[in-house]
Amino acid sequence: MKTDNLKALTISGPLDQLDEAIRRFVVDKPFHPEDACERLAAFRKLRHIEETDVYTPCLARVDALIEQLGLTPACAPSGDDTDNANAYSVEEIASYCRSVEDALRATDVVSEESRWARLAEERVIAHLKNVPVPLRDIADNRYVRKRFGILPETAWPEFLAMSDERPDQIAVEVEREHGEVFLFALCLHDGVDEMDANLSRLGFVRLKPPADLELPDCTAAEVYTRLEEEKAEAARRAEETAAKRREVIARAEPELMRRRSWLAYEAACARARRYIGHNYGKFYLFGWVPAEDADAVSAACRDMRFTCVAASPREVRNAEPPVRIRESGVRGILSPLMRMYGIPAYGTADPRVFMVITYTLFFGMMFGDAGQGACIAVLGFLLYRKTRSWLWRILSLCGLSAVVFGLIYGSVFGLEDLLPWGGYHPLEADHIMPVLLAGAAVGVVVILICMGFNIVNSLRRGDLRGAFFSANGVSGAVLYVAVLAAVACAFTGTANLLTPAYVWPLIVLPIALICLGEPLGKLLAGDPNWQPESWGMYIVEGFFDIFESAISYMSNTMSFLRVGAFAISHAGMMMVVSMLSEGAAATGSVIIMIFGNIFVAGLEAALSSIQIIRLEFYEIFGRFYIGGGHEFTPVTAACTR
């Protein structure tokens, strides 16, 4: 589970062959470039290549045009001539984009708003279609005052009665809609104020045409007839222009994609040139490649008469090799979670496989229901097929783990009497303590494995103190196992291990080695300044370090009790659901069982996932994980061909 081995390559050759070198070794290749001027400063006085990247702005313009066309950026079709560095030019591509934009502009539908359409959009016109009076006459107030609008249906009888009692007022119902009456009221000039007051009191909402609109000398029904004719003509023109637009897009799509692919590649080459140093007519390229590819690159450089020097990370001064994170297989499932914690340092253990194993194991132990686990596994599988998200992959694995432990616990949708072998029910009185201790025991094993990872990581980095004299090294592992063994024997009453022959070599000596870890590590490494400046202060600091380590051992071990506690909690919640189901009628029992399972499964899955992430980040990663790395990032074209 170690991160991939890398080698540093320094490639140099004639400056006029730089483009060929970049295309051959850098772009879309497993090559992580670094600034050659900075890396080789101790050997060469190099200068950067001063040039302007004209490809990236042009690529952005092409992408904007592709988005405007409603297309998705894609690679050029296979067999096209985009591999030819001189296939296109920025000027030609800009000209082609302008021609496509002009063609699109010619297909744009010009929306001319007719006064008929504007009239039809007004609510006042829509409800006057049944009035056989020209719109211009309706708005004429020379002889009588008119009001058109909406009145609540409950208030309409009262207003109608008022109008019948008055000789100077007429009220006409035009139509009804959604509990509202659209009315038309007429009144002589002298009585309009009283009519308006009555209408306002009854909740009248007046509707009237826009003040700036000249009303035609025709009825509302005639307006709608003309509108339908205009709409039909507009739809015909829109279909014609849409067909022309589709033709333009179909013709432009392959050409745009070819040019985009070429631009993306040239933009990547331009980015790669930023890492190049040059002097006296030669270019210098520095970067990292996977160790298994180093020989092939060196051979290719010899064929091109380039100079290529390969070195291991230890041979490079102040080397900070990148970390190549592969996403294939099981390792890629929890990569996003690992990135949340930080990229591991080069040469250390890649924790992702171990993380997947422990995550699914803990989830199964905490969830432990065969029926609910099967549903979660199927749901995760279906969602992963649809979205390809990493989250649903781990959900599927967790569901399968829950099925396995559900069979062990004998629980299927909370029912513990369906399986013929019964199962080990966590909620039984004599099973509660063993279930809790099982979680702690798994935690102990996981902590010891993490200590093993820390020892290996420290040895790879040449950190002797971390490997042998730290709380997570050999001394810490011996102390942890010795204390646990003594506590276990005392708890079970099998033996008393706290004798001088046991305590001195297995407890006192590891504590002393941990306290003296820093000077001992320097001494073994041959550092002449291995002694601390003040032994008194160092011993005091060492005492507090041991005290902190002891608390850490105890808290981390006890923290794994939550694994068993969640198994008991899950069984308890499903027992409540079963009791409620048994006390209900037949139909209600099924409904309670279904929704109870959904509620418990959702709640427990969310809580278990959160608690497991805490275990991973604090109890597990904290014992061996060394972060601070930076990811292996080769130069790739935005559209890899």
Image (spheres, grey):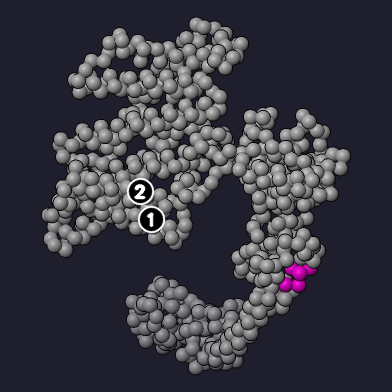
Q: Quadrant of residue 265?
A: bottom right
Q: Which residue is mark 2?
A: 398
Q: Considering the whole magenta stretch, tell me its main secondary structure.
A: helix
Identified by mark 1, the residue type is Gly
Range drawn in magenta: 95-100
- Going 42% across and 28% down the picture, which residue do you hit? 451
Location of the C terminus (image quadrant): bottom right
> In the rendered image, which quarter is residue 483 located in?
top left
**Residue sitting at x 52%, y 83%:** 125
Q: Which residue is mark 1?
A: 380
- Distance in Å between CA atoms under marks 1 and 2: 9 Å
505 vs 29: above or below: above
What residue is at 50 percent from the left and 79 percent from the top? 123
In percent of width and height, residue 395 lies at 38, 51
Closer to us: 306 or 596:
306
Q: Quadrant of residue 513?
A: top left
The reply to whether residue 370 is visible in this rendering is yes
On screen, residue 183 above or below 300: below
Q: Amino acid at mark 2?
A: Cys
